C-alpha cells in the first residue's frame, strides 16, 4: 500500500514543466543562471538579454570574476537592476536558493555553476563533488517542490567519457570518467536523466566538449597559451610551461555553445545533446595556430613541467554533435585554429592597452 499510495503523487509529478516557452510572451520570460560570472554564464546572460529575457544570476559571495566578465553590463543603467539581477547564493545554500526560486519564478534554469578545473579536482575531490555532483542534486530537489517547474539544463562534460569505448563520442557512449571532476559530472548527468524519467522533469544535459574564448579562465590550457603568445610577442614573458603536450581535444567557441543551451530549452521535449565541433586537435596544433598568429615558433618557447601533469588523463576526446545539429538546428562554426588566433589577438590588444 505504501508504494501504491505514492503512485498518484508520482504520476502527478509528471509533466509539470512549463509548456511552450515560445508562448510565454505575455508573461516576461525569466531565466535563472547559476554560475553567471563564469565564461559561459556571461555569454548566456548577454544572449538571453538580447532575446528580451529578464535574467537572474547566482553568484558566490567570494567570486572575484563577477566584475570582470559582467562589467560591461553593470555599466548600463538600462540593464543592471532593470533586466539583469544578481543574487548572492553559494550553490550549497539551499534555503537561500529556495527563497530566490519562489520569488523569481523563473521559466528557465541554466545550471552552470560548479568546480570546473579537471586538474584541480585531483587536489580537491571532495569539494568538487560537493559543488558539481551534490549541487546538481540539490537544485533538482528544490525544483521538485515548486508548484510550476521551470525547464532546466545542466552543463555536462566530455570528461564523463574519460577513456571512451566509441569515437567520436555521442549521447549514448558509456560513461567512463577518469578524474574526480568526471565522476562528479557523471553523477550529475545521470541524476538529470533519473529526474527526467522518473518525475517527468524538463531536465536536459548539454554534454559539452571544451569550449573557449577570450573570457576563458587563465588556468585552462587555451587561455594560458593565448596569453603567453601575446606576452612573449610583447617581451613581457620569456617561456611557457605546460604539462601533457600529447593532449588532444575538441575545442569550440563558447558563444556558439551557449546558443545551443538556449535551443535545448526551447525544444518540445527534454533530451541530452553532445555539443562539440566534431574535430579533434592536438595541443601542438593549437600552439602552432596561437604562436603562428603573432609570427612566433612555439617550440622556441614551450617547456614542460610534471607539476602540470595529471595523475590520469582523458584520451582522444572528440564529440559527434549530429543530434544537436539535426534536432536543434544548431551549428558549430569556429574551429580550433581560428579560435586560437582570435584569442591571441584579443589578449594582444588588451595587453597593449595596459602597457
Ligand atoms: P580540460 O581543459 O581538462 O579538457 O577541461 P584544460 O584546458 O584544463 O586541459 C586541456 C588539456 O590540456 C592539457 N594540458 C594542460 N592543461 C592545463 N590546464 N594547464 C597546462 O599547463 C596544461 N598542459 C597540458 C591537459 O592535461 C588536458 O589534456 C575543460 C574544462 O572546462 C572542464 O570544466 C570541461 O568540462 C571540459 O573542458 C570539457
Image (cartoon, rainbow, N blue to C red):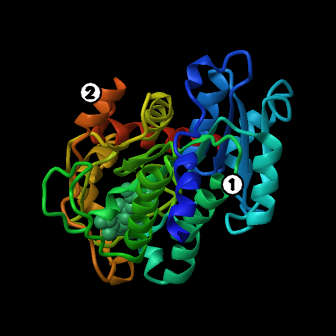
Identify the residue at horizontal 45%, vertical 50% (top origin). 196
Q: Is residue 300 left or right of residue 46?
A: left
Neighbour class for label 2 at 10 Å: few (<14), some, many (≥20)? few
Neighbour class for label 1 at 10 Å: few (<14), some, many (≥20)? few
Q: Position of residue 168 (x, y in %)?
A: 16, 50
Q: Look at discs 1 and 2 and give the one toward the viewer.
A: 1
Q: Which of the 4 quarters of the picture holds residue 311? A: bottom left
The residue indicated by pointer 1 is 145
Q: Reply above or below: 127 against 264.
A: below
Q: Reply above or below: 335 against 251.
A: above
The residue indicated by pointer 2 is 326
- Earlier-in-chain disc, 1 versus 2: 1
Q: Position of residue 279 (x, y in %)?
A: 20, 43
Query: Between 248 and 56, which is closer to the camera in this rendering?
Result: 56
Q: Which of the 4 quarters of the picture holds residue 245? A: bottom left
Q: Reply above or below: 29 against 94.
A: above
Query: Between 333 and 223, which is closer to the camera in this rendering?
Result: 333
Give the Cα separation between the discs numbered 1 and 2.
34 Å
Amino acid at each position: 500500500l505504501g508504494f501504491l499510495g505514492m503512485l498518484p503523487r508520482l504520476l502527478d509529478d509528471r509533466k509539470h514543466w512549463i509548456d511552450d516557452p515560445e508562448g510565454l510572451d505575455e508573461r516576461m520570460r525569466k531565466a535563472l543562471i547559476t554560475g553567471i560570472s563564469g565564461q559561459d554564464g556571461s555569454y548566456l546572460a548577454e544572449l538571453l538579454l538580447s532575446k528580451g529575457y529578464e535574467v537572474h544570476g547566482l553568484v558566490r559571495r567570494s567570486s572575484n570574476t563577477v566584475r570582470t566578465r559582467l562589467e560591461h553590463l553593470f555599466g548600463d543603467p538600462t540593464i543592471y537592476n532593470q533586466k539583469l539581477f544578481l543574487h548572492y547564493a553559494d550553490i550549497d545554500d539551499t534555503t537561500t536558493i529556495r527563497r530566490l526560486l519562489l520569488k523569481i519564478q523563473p521559466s528557465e534554469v541554466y545550471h552552470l555553476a560548479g568546480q570546473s578545473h579537471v586538474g584541480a579536482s585531483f587536489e580537491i575531490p571532495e569539494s568538487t563533488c560537493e559543488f558539481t555532483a551534490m549541487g546538481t542534486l540539490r537544485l533538482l530537489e528544490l525544483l521538485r517542490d515548486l508548484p510550476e517547474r521551470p525547464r532546466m539544463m545542466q552543463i555536462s562534460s566530455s570528461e564523463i567519457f574519460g577513456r571512451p569505448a566509441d569515437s567520436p563520442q555521442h549521447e549514448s557512449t558509456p560513461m567512463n570518467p577518469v578524474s574526480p571532476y568526471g565522476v562528479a559530472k557523471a553523477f550529475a548527468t545521470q541524476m538529470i536523466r533519473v529526474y527526467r524519467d522518473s518525475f517527468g522533469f524538463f531536465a536536459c544535459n548539454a554534454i559539452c566538449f571544451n569550449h573557449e574564448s577570450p573570457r576563458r579562465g587563465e588556468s585552462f590550457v587555451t587561455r594560458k597559451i593565448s596569453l603567453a603568445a601575446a606576452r612573449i610577442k610583447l617581451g613581457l614573458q620569456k617561456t611557457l610551461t605546460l604539462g601533457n603536450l600529447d593532449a588532444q581535444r575538441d575545442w569550440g567557441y563558447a558563444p556558439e555553445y551557449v546558443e545551443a543551451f538556449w535551443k535545448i530549452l526551447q525544444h518540445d521535449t527534454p533530451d541530452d545533446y553532445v555539443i562539440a565541433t566534431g574535430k579533434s586537435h592536438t595541443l601542438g596544433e593549437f600552439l602552432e595556430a596561437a604562436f603562428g598568429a603573432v609570427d612566433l615558433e612555439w617550440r622556441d618557447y614551450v617547456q614542460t613541467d610534471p607539476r602540470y601533469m595529471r595523475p590520469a588523463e582523458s584520451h582522444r576526446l572528440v564529440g559527434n554533435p549530429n543530434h544537436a545539429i539535426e534536432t536543434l538546428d544548431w551549428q558549430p562554426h569556429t574551429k580550433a585554429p581560428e579560435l586560437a588566433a582570435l584569442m591571441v589577438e584579443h589578449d594582444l590588444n588588451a595587453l597593449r592597452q595596459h602597457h
